[in-house]
Image (cartoon, grey):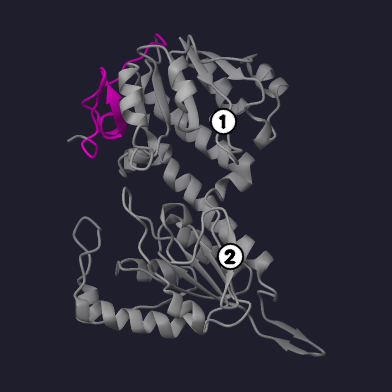
Amino acid sequence: MKLAVPRERRDGETRVAATPETVKKFKSLGLEVAVESGAGAGANFSDADYQAAGATVAPSVLADADIVLKVRGPDAGEIAQLKQGAVLAALLAPHSEKDAPAALAARGVTAFAMEFLPRISRAQSMDVLSSQANLAGYKAVIDAAATFGRAMPMMMTAAGTIAPARVLVMGVGVAGLQAIATAKRLGAIVSATDVRPATKEQVESLGGTFVAVMDEEFKNAQTAAGYAKPMSAEYQAKQAALTAETIKKQDIVITTALIPGRKAPILVTEEMIKTMKPGSVIVDLAAGAGGNTPLSKPEETVKAHGVTIMGSTNLPGALAADASALYARNLFNFISLIVDKKTGALNMDWNDEIVAGSGLTRDGAVVHPSLKG
């Protein structure tokens, strides 16, 4: 069976779906691996690196591929090259790229959307969202520190003391936790907020201060499954007032709130931005989904009311070598689940919750429940 790794064609996408390390692993599964010329250039993997790992490097690799691995979903031209029955695994963004699922189904492709992977312990080694969000949280703080016109840590000098920067992280998921840890390592005073009570302990374990109205409603604001419950209008008003008062004191704000399939929630209003100190920085990790501020613009740095608002939509791509290495290992672990290790043939168990949960198209139809009907 042939596994193909084409070059990414989206503007600014520097990552690659397989590295020389994972090529060797795929070869050990009995797969023939073909890599498109230049596929790894953005992550500093040369064609010679792939050849040394056992891959065939060619100008075109899709037409006869049984398995195709990509970072971002294929464009129309690539879909047209996929053979019927091919398996595709990538970040397919089916909620925003609405035509792609139907096009893949019509082509007879079995497509797996890696962002739909169930968040269960058995799938952790395949969790591309976590591996990429971890790097995004780190890079968000590094970019903010580089843009911020002052030092991050407290410095005591003969000429006087420089106060440490204050950083607020909004949303304590994987990206948020890494942002907290990175900001602390750089010497900032860090606080964080989230709608889930269980994150308070996580924030404090990293040395941050948790910001929330700690009343009885908040303490019971999480379901047994770990999801946030809807909050009353009264609580939301109290929390908004606390957030607004907190933001006034911050030098850097990192926002990370994303809701799959929906526009990102507004966490920082324009009125809040107006109260921030001149020279402050906001890094909006949700800029590509509408933004956590109303002033964020995808792939742009905006200056408004004396505040710099950064809207990069692919921070992991700025760390392409590491992001590709992690992503490629995630994909190898996933493909290992659907390839028979003895025969090297595809063996997809659709009763497996990982396979079923990430399956987007199958047998000429769109099969994922979130997109049906």
Q: Is residue 213 visible?
A: no
**Residue at position x 70%, y 34% from top?**
44
At label 2, counting other C-alpha atoms closer than 10 Å, the crowd grade (few under 14, some 14-19, many 20 or more) is some
Vertical arrangement, residue 115 with respect to residue 157, above or below = above
Residue identifier under label 1: 8
Q: Give the image location of residue 114, x and y in percent.
A: 39, 36
Inspect the image, locate mark 2, and give the three-letter code of the amino acid beneath it.
Val
Image vertical order of residue 223 relative to residue 8, above or below: below
Query: Which of the two residues, 45 or 86, is positioned nearer the viewer here?
Result: 86
Picture coordinates of residue 144, whole percent (x, y)? 61, 65
Mark 1 residue type: Glu
Left or right side of 247 for 238: left
Callout 2: helix, strand or loop?
A: strand
Q: How many marks?
A: 2
Judge from the rendering whether residue 170 lies leftward or rightward of residue 224; answer left or right: right
Residue drawn at (57%, 70%) of the image: 184
For the point 52% across and 18% down, which residue is it?
4
Name the foreground residue: 248 vs 162: 248
Secondary structure of residue under mark 1: loop
- Label at residue 302: 2
For residue 358: magenta?
yes
Give the percent coordinates (x, y) of residue 250: 53, 79
Is residue 156 shown above or below 121?
Answer: below
